[in-house]
Image (cartoon, rainbow, N blue to C red):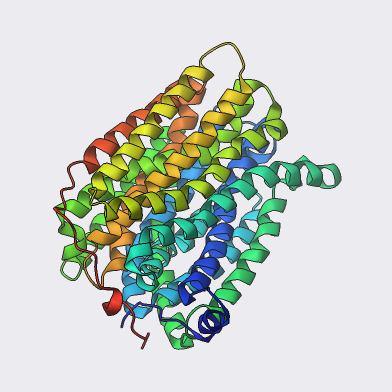
Amino acid sequence: MNGTLPAGRFEKKFERKGRWKSYHVVWLWLFMAWMMLYIDRSVTGPVVAWMIENDVSFLASAPLPHALGGIIGSMFFAGYMLTQFPAGYLGDKYGYKVLIVISLAWSAVTTFASGLARDLQSFVAFRILTGLGEGAYYSNDRAVVQAITPVEKRGLGMGIVFVGLAAGLTIATLFTPWLLDSASLSMGKESAWSIPFLIFSLPTLLICLAVWRFVGPKVERRMLTKAGIRLLLISALFLIVLMATYALTVSLGLGSVFQACAVLLAAVGLLVVIYSRLRMVSGKVLQDRRLLLMYVSAIPILYTLWFFGFWALLVVSEATRLGLSGAAAYAALFGVASGLGYPIGGKIYDAAKRKHIAPRWIYSALCLAVAALVFMVALLVNTVAEDVLLLGLLIFLIGVLFAAAQTAHMTFTSELAPPGMAGQTFGMWNLVAEIGAVISPVLSGALRDLTGDWTVAIVLDGLLLLASAIMVLFVRTQGVPAKDRSHFVRSQH
């Protein structure tokens, strides 16, 4: 089985009509898919922030509400990280489009179900399930972009498609507080929190149907069934282990940080099982020293993404006393700027490679610039004077350079991927990177509760970025050759 995605009739029709190429059409659909998936996951942060501000529902009586809100976000990412590599393996076997369609449908259903939850345990379970389903998307999306994009435009393609991520994050940050305030007027605060989950699930399902219908050739339903059943069985095991770990930590009265550590240890245990079962067939992906450095250096990337993606709203609100609605526009600058930064990073990467600049220098330079800006935010938040415009400018610049750095890191990883194993390579990249996403919301929230402000949490993020930049400098490629894309473009049979 080959997981690649040759052009379908829909893309070829556009190519005949004008300057658009078939890969441009695929970029567009994957952009929209990323947008909806990121709305579905990013909506949790604003909803939790709104619950904390309004003493709503199951967060009302929590002694450390920020830490509890963080554990909810961390549980999503615990599920998300676990299906990364298995889904990449299934994509290489059954087809990348098959896993993309399954992931989108899964996210739509579980996001809707999240809005129906009426207690903390069921809400956490549905967030884990959403993460498990969305975890099947990244590795297969990145593999499709690599497969259908000309080598000389691969960095740009990686960045443009990822603009959907930024768009989804921005939409969730800007519109969720407004949706919640509007819904609370007619439904009351105890029920209004569910509205964003119910509303945003529908367009995710519509995009799923569109991708199934219009992107690439049609896939056989038996492939969807086989891959779906295998992913469901794997996810059921992961869900049982994660929920059992969560329930045990609650019964023992452990704090949210210890809960997150226990969940992470359980996830690592499951990863050891995955590694032991697949290392014989996936040794090139799991044992290459250069790839291992790329995987580990990606942890601060996801840590930073979900520090700002989950807590930016409260950071701005508390630093400026604007309130959630007033702070939303400034917090959303991170997402808006990321939308610019992802393709800019691709252009920078492609141009630097043409000038024979080593990929490690491209990423490290961008990452160091982000770290410097993050330290400036920590300094600003720690001052007495409010400077809303400067804080907004710093968040915007961080968003641009961070997204550019992430694109450079992903494109560099794609060039190191063994032939025919792109799905597994990207799956492993995101699996390890998601350790940062699991830790980030709960650790940052706990540091905020313990210290009384966001300064320490922001400084920690900057230090992690410094470590990432240094690690990538040790990835010596000695001129990794550009791969011929011909071995990727085969039919899905």
Question: Is residue 235 placed above or below 437 in the rendered structure?
Answer: below
Q: Quadrant of the N terminus?
A: bottom left
Can you give x and y, in whole percent of width and height, for residue 11 in the image?
A: 52, 80
Choose top left, top right, bottom left or bottom right for residue 13: bottom right
Q: Nearer the viewer, residue 296 or 353?
A: 353
Can you give x and y, in whole percent of width and height, for residue 166 in the image?
A: 54, 50
Residue found at x 44% / y 87%: 222
Can you give x and y, in whole percent of width and height, for residue 407 in the image?
A: 39, 51
Can you give x and y, in whole percent of width and height, for residue 45 in the image?
A: 58, 42
Residue found at x 46% / y 53%: 343
Q: Is residue 13 visible?
A: yes
Residue found at x 55% / y 64%: 33
Q: Residue furthest right?
A: 186
Q: How many marks?
A: 0
**In this rendering, position of residue 237 left or right of residue 331:** left
Q: Nearer the viewer, residue 469 or 16?
A: 16
Choose top left, top right, bottom left or bottom right for residue 112: bottom right
Question: Is residue 179 placed above or below 377 in the rendered structure?
Answer: below
Choose top left, top right, bottom left or bottom right for residue 405: top left
Q: Nearer the viewer, residue 64 or 12?
A: 12
**In this rendering, position of residue 470 left or right of residue 320:** left
Residue found at x 17% / y 64%: 284
Q: Residue furthest top?
A: 384
Q: Is residue 254 visible?
A: no
**In this rendering, position of residue 107 left or right of residue 270:** right
Q: Quadrant of the C terminus?
A: bottom left
**In this rendering, position of residue 433 left or right of residue 382:** left
